[in-house]
Image (cartoon, helix red, strand yellow):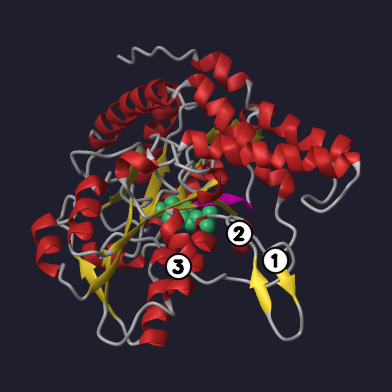
Amino acid sequence: MIETVLDIQTIRKDFPILNREVNGKPLVYLDNAATSQTPQQVIDVIVDYYQNYNANIHRGVHALSQEATDKYEQARQKIQKHFNAGKGYEIIFTSGTTHGINLVANGFSSLLKKGDEILVSAMEHHSNIVPWQMLCERTGAVLKVIPMNEEGELLMDEYSKLLSERTKLVFCNHISNALGTINPIEEIIEKAHAVNAAVLIDGAQAAPHVKADMQALDVDFYTVSAHKMCGPTGVGALYGKEEWLNKLPPYQGGGEMIAEVTFEKTTYADLPHKFEAGTPNICGGIAFGAALDYMNAIGFDAIAAYEHELLEYATEQLLSIEGLRIYGTAKHKTSVISFNIGGIHPYDIGTILDKLGIAVRTGHHCAQPIMDFYKIPGTVRASFSFYNTKEEADALVSGVERARNMLL
Ligand SMILES: *Cc1c(COP(=O)(O)O)cnc(C)c1O
């Protein structure tokens, strides 16, 4: 039985999209790990921006520009407060997690030399593998992988063995988007710091479920995407410790990131503007702040507790289907269920579910190395959010059963 403190039916009314039908069936949206849906409160903020104070920021003397600048900077403060960053200028607006990671990877080009080592976990998103491979090509640094076990948990003893004075950077996701594993990032950070390596944590998948505390974690960099936590696409944030952000060179050149420009020499603006070249996603940044307000009003403890109940319920029900195997059975995991049934291709199951109005993800989930580890082409992935219900879990289970009977 699900005993929840959340009033899910009231919460669902905030999400207009949840009322729509797909293929004549009520939408059951279980692709939240790819992108979350947007509540009316956030949609209203987006509309208000374009209807009432759309203007470029930080440079105008006129009223609209002032208003937009104030709201944008207030959003930065909301992000700072939410993630408990020490200083507002340690929050850099980005276009999303991928941008944040590339910004850091690019910055380290000038700090690494041949023979230095970068450690990444075996369960990374492609956005957290490719930039490091490119960085290694530029610098001669070597990429090493922290292995995982069958359950989808990192082998921390192996991690300890990989760390040495050659290790300059460690990269790991807080929560795996393909398996749902919650990684022991406190221990990862502490051990990396013991050999003076910097740590970047990819928080894209964690931020919708848990509130990470930058100062308590003592993390060097942390990235998030607004669209996975009730905000719009195309905007996110990178947290960086002041000392690191000062050490890294700017990522892109352009307006906003300069202090003074002559043809002989340009000096860079102070943080955070040094990393915010060009006109940003102003409306998106403001809406990101509104999304944090929305989620905080519900409360992250209540969200995590409810999603955990949904996870346990859906897991148990799915496992009652003959031949179904779940990938990612870590002790600590969030509401992501990746599975296959026998040799049925995940795409075929996903297509039948779509006919029933059920949205899941199929494929390698931008994490090909995990699929190689399990020797499978991909999985079906159902990912639950706080606005999903037990009835939707039931719809998934009966849909999967139906798909199995059709395909086997
Ligand atoms: C979604 C995701 C990303 C990429 O985020 P973008 O918003 O596409 O930049 C990176 N890592 C993880 C773990 C993710 O879930």
Label 1 crowd bin: few (<14), some (14–19), many (20+), radius 10 Å: few
Of residues 81 and 226, the one drawn nearer to the viewer in this rendering: 81
Left or right of 16 in this view: 138: left
Front position in the image: 62 or 179: 62
Tell me which segment is drawn in magenta: 234-238
Q: Amino acid at mark 2?
A: Asp
Q: Amino acid at mark 3?
A: Lys
Q: Which label belongs to residue 247?
A: 3
**The residue at label 1 has a CB less than 8 Å from ligand 1:** no
Q: Quadrant of residue 208?
A: top left
Q: Can you see residue 302?
A: yes
Q: Position of residue 377 (x, y in %)?
A: 34, 65
Up-down: is 307 above or below 225?
Answer: above
Res. 260 image quadrant: bottom right
The x, y position of residue 254, in whole percent, is 71, 70
Is the residue under label 1 in contact with that under label 2 (CB below 8 Å)? Answer: yes
Assign the magenta stretch its main secondary structure. strand
Residue at 32% x, 28% y: name it.
308
Q: Position of residue 407 (x, y in %)?
A: 37, 51
Mark 2 and mark 1 lie on one chain; the one further toward the N terminus is 1
Image position of 189 (left or right of 300): left
**On residue 270, which mark appears?**
2
Residue 298 in the image, given as x and y percentages of width and height? 50, 20
Q: Residue at x 50, y 56 (%)?
A: 97
Q: Is residue 386 above or below residue 83?
A: above
- Determine the CA span between mark 2 and mark 1: 8 Å
Q: Is residue 392 magenta?
A: no
The residue under label 1 is 259
Which residue is the extreme one toward the right? 62
